Amino acid sequence: MLAHGPATSYDLKQRVGGTIGNFWAFAHSQLYDEPARLAEAGLLVASEEEGGRRRRTYSITDLGRAALREWLSAPTPDQTEVRDLGLLKLFFSTFGADGDLATLAHDRFESHRARADEYARMYEVLVPHADPWSMKSLELGIRIERCAQEFWAEFRDELGGA
């Protein structure tokens, strides 16, 4: 995220929340701990405010950019991780009460619809300004959410829901 420009840990939290935080979950504490560790490794530099809150602003170094390029060029054979509470509940639904499946299908449909709609709004706002590769990740996010929305709609219909 610092390749996009210098930031404090709080700034990073804001940047991540509206971008990669939509598809890569991690503890926010990493945004406070990791920059200091990367600075110690020479991948970032930190500048601290003289007064006030003495916030640290981090910037990427040439060594950090080289490490980023190395990471980007490395093979990516890993399987996509899916961590979806709705799918977990669906798997164990045999043990639930009557009506739980209909509620689950409805709730998951609405959740995926809302997220896809939000991503689509973001896309329209960002498309003239953002780099094309960030937009491609947003396009995939929209497709994934629409696909999940469709799955839950079909499942809801199988259950006889409206």
Image (tube, rainbow, N blue to C red):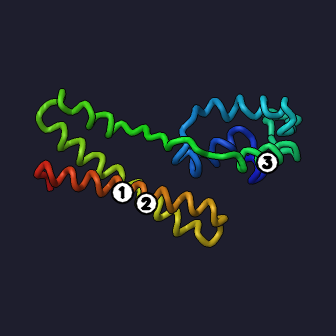
Identify the residue position indicated by label 3 in the image.
Answer: 6
Residue flagged by tag 2: what amino acid is it? Arg
Q: Secondary structure at mark 1?
A: helix
* Picture residue at 22% right of the left edge, 55% below the top: 154
Residue 117 in the image, given as x and y percentages of width and height: 41, 61
Residue 161 in the image, given as x and y percentages of width and height: 13, 52
Dots 3 and 2: beta carbons under 8 Å? no
Q: How far, Cα to Cα, is label 1 from label 2?
A: 6 Å
Q: Which label lies toward us, 3 or 1? A: 1
Residue flagged by tag 1: what amino acid is it? Cys
Q: Identify the mark nearer the N-term, 3 or 1.
A: 3
**Of the pair 159 and 104, the residue shown nearer to us:** 159
Determine which quarter of the picture holds residue 153: bottom left
Image position of 52 with respect to 110: above or below: above
Dots 1 and 2: beta carbons under 8 Å? yes
Q: Which mark is residue 135?
A: none
Image position of 126 with respect to 31: above or below: below
Q: Which mark is residue 143?
A: 2
* Picture residue at 78% right of the left edge, 35% below the top: 55
Quadrant of the drawing holding the C terminus: bottom left
Q: Identify the mark nearer the N-term, 3 or 2.
A: 3
Q: Secondary structure at mark 2?
A: helix
Image position of 24 with respect to 38: above or below: below
Q: Which mark is residue 147?
A: 1
Label count reads 3
Residue flagged by tag 3: what amino acid is it? Pro
Does residue 149 appear left or right of residue 58 in this picture?
left
